Image: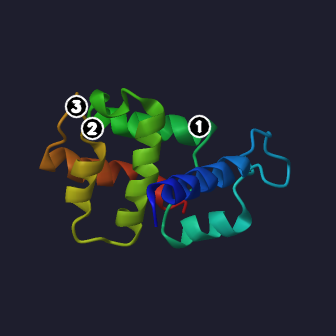
Amino acid sequence: MNRAAAALAAVAALAALTACSSNDEPTAETKPSAVPSKAHADALAKAGIPPKPEGQTRTDLLAALRKVSPALVADEDKAVDHARNQCSAVNNKEPKRDWMAQQRFSSSGHEVSEAEAAQINEAIAEFCATA
């Protein structure tokens, strides 16, 4: 294949790819739902992950983590997400659940110790039981 033919083929391929793109807004049919589906909720429950806590449940969860270390709840949304995900290890009696808590809750501002990791798992146990 000569250079001209190769260049023409490349231009044609690019034109075909750009012609397929669209700037249209997603329709209701393609837009993801803001509400988790029943199947999604069931999968989370099966994995031992409770639903996002609201109201007093959220307040109690954050208070339990704050007792272990205030640094754990510097970002409350992340703390809740970490706790929910850690519930999978707690509820499934993962042998390395303390290590997993250490990894999950450590941040650049606070390195979770082994003792704190065990305390985290104890602190979230009641919340995890809601899964």
Instruction: Identify whether 72 is placed above or below 7.
Output: above
Of the image marks 2 and 1, the number of the one nearer the N terminus: 1
Tag 1 residue? 56
Residue at x-position 42% and y-position 34%: 63
The mark total stands at 3
Whole-Å distance between the Cαs marked 1 and 3? 29 Å
Residue at x-position 48% and y-position 67%: 48
Query: In the figure, is residue 52 to the left or right of 88?
Result: right
Q: Nearer the viewer, residue 57 or 33?
A: 33
At label 2, the amino acid type is: Val
Instruction: Identify whether 51 is placed above or below 71.
Output: below
Res. 126 visible in picture: no
Tag 2 residue? 68
Q: Secondary structure at mark 2?
A: helix
Figure coloring? rainbow
Percent from the top left, x then y, of residue 125?
39, 56
Of the image marks 3 and 2, the number of the one nearer the N terminus: 2
Res. 71 visible in picture: yes
Q: Secondary structure at mark 1?
A: helix
Query: In the figure, is residue 99 to the left or right of 125?
Result: left
Q: Nearer the viewer, residue 97 or 24?
A: 24
